[in-house]
Amino acid sequence: MIHVAVLGYGTVGSGVVEVIEGNKALVNKRALTELNIKYILDLMDFPGDPYENKVVHDVNVILDDPEVSIVCETMGGVRAAYEFTKKALLKGKSVCTSNKEMVAKYGPEMLQLAKENNCNYLFEASVGGGIPIIRPINEALTAEKLEAITGILNGTTNYILTKMQNEGAKFEDVLKQAQDLGYAELHPEADIEGFDACRKIAILSSLMVGKTVNYEDIYTEGITKITADDFVYAKAMGKSIKLLAMSKALENGTLAMVSPCMIDASSPLYMVQDVFNAVLVRGNMLGDAMFYGKGAGKLATASAVVADVIECARNMDTTLPIFWDAEVEKLVDIADVERAFFVRAKAADKAAVLAAFGGAEVVEVAGRDDFALVTSVMKEKDFAAKYEALGDKVITRIRIEA
Ligand code: HSE
């Protein structure tokens, strides 16, 4: 029997207990041993909860119990989570986490500690909720040189954009729905400003290059400026607008960024709707492979944590290889990256805007007092100079991802 502790009995933590108990027979079979939830750490009590007698408030009860060999860190944040994870690993207890902030910030440190203490630090649930993506990169795609990872990595924003596109819904109303469904982060700006997707692409980029891609170095733009009007044009152009988190191996280095982008109907990411996430991985031998599924929500995320627990149970006293060095990967400056841009402007300013973007393709929708254009491919910095010079003659711009 292996004893497990769950740190944090919130959405994901209670989901972990539900998955282990709900799928008990098959989880035990696949873990090759019985998993027993011995403790649940939380600040609160849960009177009436079937596991209320497992709840403890002092982490030392868990850390000092030699019987506990696997800890699920589903607390979130990086203060207490950092301290508890570190202490658990130092005692040789494996840690399975859904905490992307922790992994993005302290991944290499925790992996090193796990190595030194013959245990594991696994984080499948930190990216893409229930979608298997970390283990595929670490195990199934090890023969590949990964050239690009492009993901829809935030369920809340994808849910919002989908509702805006399909129902013309208002941003605030849909955000509230996503919060009620348990998809959103505690502070909504983490989702809508792209910070959550940024942490996740930092993790995937680090695994892609085998070094540390600091999330602070990643250019990040959220979806707060996207409006229903932009979707009118996207639709007319046969495109959609998605919050993309991207990492690419370019000739002069690694590009990583998060930004709303227009993508074509021919992109495999086009049909990813609602809370679903997808990660499109390009390998130099394999070509493209896409991983798709529920990127947020209690049981989907908890399922990935429990899969990591099972992996730990099968590999007691062995540290599974994860190639992520502490050395920092310097990123390419996005100012030098080339792409086309969608620009929307007032019809009255058409002449001035077209003059600035010579050779652009014009898009018009009948009965409107605005128009749009798609620029030729140009460097971000050249586009930015023209766009800024136009001032309030332009309403918005969106990157186009080929
Ligand atoms: N707030 C996150 C999302 C939860 O919407 O994707 C999963 O990380």
Image (cartoon, grey):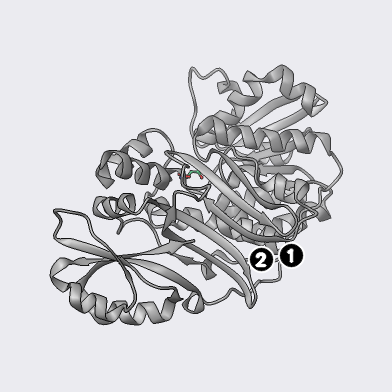
Say whether residue 247 is left or right of residue 396: right
User: Is the residue under label 2 in contact with that under label 1 (CB below 8 Å)?
Assistant: yes
Q: Residue at x 63, y 53 (%)?
A: 281
Amino acid type, label 1: Asp
Q: Amino acid at mark 2?
A: Thr
Residue at the spot of label 1:
325
The image shows residue 287 at horizontal and vertical percentages of 68, 54
Q: Of label 1 and label 2, which has the lower sequence position? A: 2
Q: Residue furthest right?
A: 317
- Inspect this view and state whether residue 88 appears: no
| Residue 71: image location, x then y, percent | 69, 39
Label 1 CA crowd tier, 10 Å (few <14, some 14–19, many 20+): some
In this rendering, position of residue 197 left or right of residue 369: right
**Residue at 66% of width from left, 71% of height from top?**
328
Is residue 215 in view from this perspective? yes
Q: Position of residue 189 (x, y in %)?
A: 37, 54
